[in-house]
């Protein structure tokens, strides 16, 4: 019984290491094949439209509401200490450093990541990827790489939109609804937000999240068994693994970027 | 006639489950060779091994004198440009129209001007009777039509080797006859070699030059269709005449019905 348990744990550990190895190899292969896209930018542009543009609505609305809530909660707290003039700074830092990149990444994983996994998984189930291989077209280059780069480009742009709309939401609630001084709201923000340390680092976080989520989504679809059940499971795995990866990466990146 | 494809001592298994055991097959240039057998006999696996999508456990497949599983990715892709394959369910790209599906290999592998691509695609679609369906999406056409579009796509680059995986399955009698003739005519017109995997006896025998019968991953009989028609081999006889009794059991092996219903103990 103990031997069986050890064997199962060993097999699971081996499978885990094997899957990491396969994933890493696929990632390197995809990067190696990516330069070919320079000749065919249209493939990436099409995917930017599908996964980036179609995510705009949910990102914009979410950004607006998150900014409004942040403005409201920030005001309640700052007001206790008579520091409500700093509301603009709090909203801007909260959004550009953390909430913008993280929530955008989570929404992107749910909105675009799942659709990528399902699309690739169903292409595999319908033998479309095999057909492509038999036509001497590498599906990693033709299907995965354009989607990957579209995801990597989309996430930071969407996060920027999220943060900008969020700041506007905070402004609406703080200045227009509650009556915080407009000049203080913007000037504190202008004085306290650092272009490199806050905005660039937040942008860099989004790029890392974009790489992680898009690759996880594509890999889950590509490695899914060609059955409806496994494609469904792969879609769930995309959300679970991406979400955990976002939190883990956020902690590591925050520690690296914002430590004194 | 020299062989375009040669299979020697080919063994293949999925994990511990053997699929093919010690196959020897020849596919001469310019001929139509059918690989026949019941479901699960390993026919499609043979096609995937020829195309290099699977690696043999033992033995080899040679195409154009090259051992397929020893080729690197670039050489394999180069070899595949000379192949066309019709998948069992068509495997059309569902986000593209019928026209774009057939144009796909032309656009990927050639720098032909768009007007020429258009003319070539329309000619291929005309050959399969679907020129007027060019603007439809795969979801808007029937399964049989999708198969014909896939056939047009597989011959888009005029390949030297065309592989068909169950091209007659699910076709109506008219389409079946037309497709069978089309396969034969394409083979003659393009001077290509055809590997035809199917279990439709009438159509295969009508257009094939040579037939291999597979059962449980082994070749049980082979010869020209006329020989196979009058073969006394029990497997071929059962298959050709669609007999219920014979070496191929209808029921999956296991306990008898009497055992399952508990009738054995009473008796």
Image (tube, coloured by chain):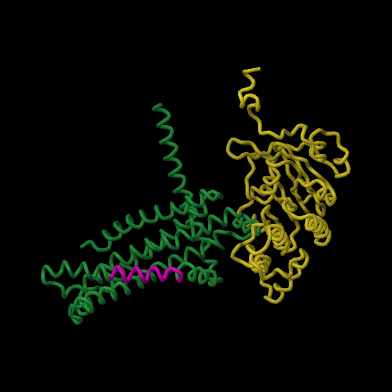
- At 86% from the left and 41% from the top, the residue drawn is B229
Q: Is residue A197 visible?
A: no
Chain for colour green = A
Residue B183 is covered by the magenta coloring:
no
In the image shown, does B85 or B199 lie closer to the viewer?
A: B199
| Rendered view: A246 above or below B104 | above
Say left or right for A65 vs A132: left
- At 29% from the left and 68% from the top, the residue drawn is A66
- At 29% from the left and 57% from the top, the residue drawn is A251
In the image shown, does B88 or A47 lie closer to the viewer?
A: B88
Percent coordinates x, y for residue B37 in the rendering: 74, 41
Quarter of the image where the C terminus of chain B is located:
top right
- At 57% from the left and 59% from the top, the residue drawn is A139
- Which quadrant would residue B230 be assigned to in this image? top right
Chain for colour yellow = B
User: Can you name the residue that lies furthest to the bottom here?
Assistant: A183
Residue A57 is covered by the magenta coloring:
yes
Callout count: 0
Q: Which span is picked out in magenta? A: A53-67
Main secondary structure along the magenta-highlighted residues: helix
Say left or right for B178 vs A35: right
Q: Is residue A206 visible?
A: yes
- Which quadrant would residue B184 be assigned to in this image? bottom right
Percent coordinates x, y for residue B195 in the rendering: 76, 51
Percent coordinates x, y for residue A44 in the rendering: 51, 69
| Rendered view: A217 above or below B34 | below
Percent coordinates x, y for residue A127 in the rendering: 61, 54
């Amino acid at each position: 019984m103990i031997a069986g348990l050890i064997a199962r744990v060993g097999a699971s550990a081996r499978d885990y290491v094997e899957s990491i190895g396969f994933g890493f190899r696929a990632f390197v292969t995809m990067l190696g094949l990516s330069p070919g896209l320079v000749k065919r930018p249209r493939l990436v542009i099409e995917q930017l439209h599908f996964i980036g543009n179609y995510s705009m609505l949910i990102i914009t609305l979410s950004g607006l509401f998150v900014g409004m809530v942040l403005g409201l909660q920030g005001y309640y707290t700052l007001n206790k200490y008579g520091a409500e003039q700093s509301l603009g700074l709090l909203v801007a830092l909260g959004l550009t450093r953390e909430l913008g990149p993280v929530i955008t990444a989570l929404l992107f994983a749910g909105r675009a990541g799942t659709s990528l996994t399902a699309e690739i998984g169903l292409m595999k189930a319908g033998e479309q990827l095999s057909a492509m291989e038999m036509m001497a077209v590498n599906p990693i280059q033709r299907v995965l790489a354009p989607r990957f780069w579209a995801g990597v480009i989309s996430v930071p742009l969407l996060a920027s939109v999220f943060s900008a709309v969020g700041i506007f939401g905070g402004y609406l609630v703080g200045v227009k609804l509650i009556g915080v001084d407009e000049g203080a709201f913007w000037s504190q923000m202008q004085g306290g937000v650092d272009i490199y340390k806050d905005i660039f680092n937040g942008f860099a976080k989004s790029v890392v999240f974009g790489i992680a989520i898009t690759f996880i989504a594509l890999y889950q679809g590509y490695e899914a068994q060609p059955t409806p059940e496994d494609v469904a499971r792969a879609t769930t795995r995309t959300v679970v693994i991406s979400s955990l990866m976002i939190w883990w990466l956020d902690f590591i990146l925050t520690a690296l970027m914002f430590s004194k | 006639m020299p062989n375009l494809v040669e299979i020697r001592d080919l063994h293949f298994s999925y994990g511990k489950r053997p699929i093919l055991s010690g196959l020897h097959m020849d596919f001469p240039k310019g001929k139509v060779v059918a690989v026949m057998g019941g479901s699960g006999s390993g026919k499609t696996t043979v096609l995937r091994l020829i195309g290099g999508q699977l690696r043999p456990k033992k033995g080899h497949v040679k195409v154009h004198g090259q051992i397929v599983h020893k080729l690197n990715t670039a050489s394999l892709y180069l070899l595949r440009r000379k192949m066309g394959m019709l998948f069992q369910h068509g495997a059309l790209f569902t986000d593209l129209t019928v026209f774009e599906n057939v144009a796909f290999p032309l656009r990927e592998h050639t720098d032909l001007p768009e007007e020429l691509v258009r003319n070539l695609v329309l000619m291929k679609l005309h050959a399969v009777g679907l020129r007027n369906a060019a603007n439809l999406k795969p979801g808007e056409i029937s399964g049989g039509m999708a198969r014909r579009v896939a056939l047009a796509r597989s011959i888009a680059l005029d390949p030297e080797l065309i592989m068909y995986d169950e091209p007659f399955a699910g076709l109506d009698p008219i389409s079946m006859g037309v497709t069978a003739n089309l396969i034969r005519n394409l083979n003659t017109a393009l001077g290509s070699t055809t590997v035809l995997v199917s279990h439709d006896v009438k159509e295969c025998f009508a257009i094939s030059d040579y037939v291999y019968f597979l059962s449980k991953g082994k070749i049980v009989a082979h010869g020209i269709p006329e020989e196979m028609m009058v073969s006394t081999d029990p497997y071929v006889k059962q298959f050709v005449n669609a007999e219920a009794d014979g070496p191929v059991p209808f029921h999956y092996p296991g306990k008898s019905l009497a055992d399952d219903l508990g009738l054995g103990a009473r008796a």
